[in-house]
Amino acid sequence: MENYARKLAMKVEKSALTQGLIRCHDCGRLAKQTSHTNHCPLCDSRLHARTSNSFQRTAALLLSGVSLYIPANIFPIMTVSQFGVGEPHTIVGGIIALIHSDMIPIAMLVLIASILVPLLKLLGLGLLLLCVYYRWQVNARLWTNMYRIIAFVGRWSMLDIFMISILVSLVDLGGVAQIIAGPAATAFAAVVVLTMFAAKSFDPRLIWDSQQ
Amino acid sequence: MSKTDLEACAECDLLLNPARPALGEKARCPRCGYLLQRPRKQSIERTLALSIAGLILIFPANLLPLVGIKILGNTRDGNIWSGVAALFGENMWGVAVLVFLASILFPLLNIILSLLISGHLYFKKPNPHLARWMRWLQHLDEWAMLEVYTLGIIVACVKLASIAELKFDFGLYAFIALLIITGMLSSSLDEYLFWRHIGELRQKVGHES
Ligand SMILES: [Zn+2]
């Protein structure tokens, strides 16, 4: 692997963009940059040297995600009713209930997927935006790795949503026992989708562009 | 060698000489560590075989009951569809649509697109839609969440185990088999190789006409 690295790198480290080349976002082929907007010769997708409006789109999606994160945690995500007595659960409440019934590993799993991952994702994307905006001189490789982790873990937050869809369909015995999804489920699902889109619209090459 | 025969890293835009890694090796960007290429043994053949297996398994995994519960003499079976239907019934249509897309439609499209693309490449049959299908497949990939859904089943079962009697149905085994197949499918598909073949097929058509 090490000799690959040596063979791969050009003598001087240059980015494709500074050489007038654009890498197709979809198929990876290089094309010459021209004045008019053009399409990739191999796969026909529109060529952009960098994801278009990456900063603005990521910032907008991130802010929507942050504002929906509040109702997602305040309102009940599901209501468990037994013999007509309903007990609403928030995300945190559900985790506490799991701890009380001695299901610690599952409680940890839900804690990571529903609380830690979304929080760290919102925070991490915010930091990445600040880094690009203020052109911080950072260890770009480290920050790119942080971006990769954020982009990878996002989908696992859907755990709670899938779990609720299963519980809602199984526990539906009318007055005896019933589980109903709450308004926080919609808000939380929106947070997951918005932050996944935010991670996708952030272009990690911007970190490298701002390094001198 | 023309400038466009070079390569650029997707995540740091470093200009690179094309790598020629052997089977089982990985070529990474020397600057940021991005995985550039990961050649697989018989990538096209394996992708074709696995997508056929996935297409067969997706029917029992979707249609048969996954888990059943018994509370106070009442029994209920559930599968992916009943979860979507229950959410729709409670007017949670946004969440219902999301669950439907991530656990039913996108995994299905993923398998169909893999089948179409690898089938065309295997029989060296050009098709003007190949590049579009490949682009769709790449964008769809992260929205098909069968493995997250499986974890959701496990957590739901643990929660229910204390209040109800659980029964695992045949659909669950089909679902787990489907999960393994789709995991193998995405690791057997070598995007770099696929794009190269799509480009070659396109050139072939260009020369003939
Ligand atoms: Zn790189």
Image: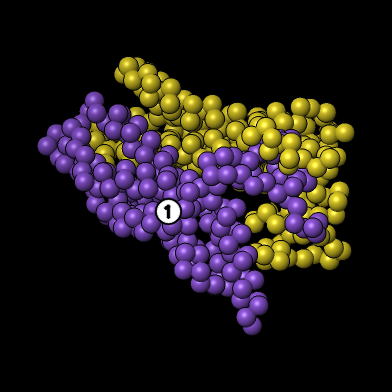
Along the line of sight, the residue nearer the viewer: A136 or B129: B129
Q: Residue at x 34, y 48 (%)?
A: B178
Which quadrant of the structure image shows residue B129?
bottom right
> For the point 82% across and 29% down, which residue is it?
A136
Asked which quadrant contains residue B119, the reply is: bottom left
> Considering the image in quadrants, where does the C terminus of chain B appear?
bottom right
Badge 1 crowding class, 10 Å Cα cut-off, few under 14, some 14 to 19, many 20 or more, is some
Residue B135 seen in this snapshot: no
Q: Is mark 1 within 8 Å of ligand 1?
A: no
Q: Is residue A119 visible?
A: yes
Name above or below for residue A11 compared with residue B92: above
Is A106 positioned to the left or the right of B165 in the image?
A: right
Compared to residue A198, the image places residue A25 above or below, namely: below
Residue at (55% x, 67% y) in the render: B130
Residue occupying the far left of the picture: B73
Residue A173 percent across, percent down from the top left: 22, 41
Residue located 84% across and 34% down the image: A211
Q: Is A53 positioned to the left or the right of B207 in the image?
A: right
Q: Position of residue A18 (x, y in %)?
A: 86, 48
x then y, percent, for residue B184: 42, 46
Chain letter of the yellow region = A
Q: Quadrant of the N terminus of chain B?
A: bottom right
- Of A167 and A157, nearer the camera is A157
Q: Nearer the viewer, residue A204 or B73?
A: A204
- Colour mode of the rendering: by chain
Residue ID for mark 1: B46
Give the left or right position of residue B204, taking residue B99 as reference.
right
- Which of the chains bears the disc numbered 1? B
* Residue type highlighted by circle 1: Arg
Chain ID for purple: B
Kindly state the secondary structure of the residue where label 1 is placed: helix
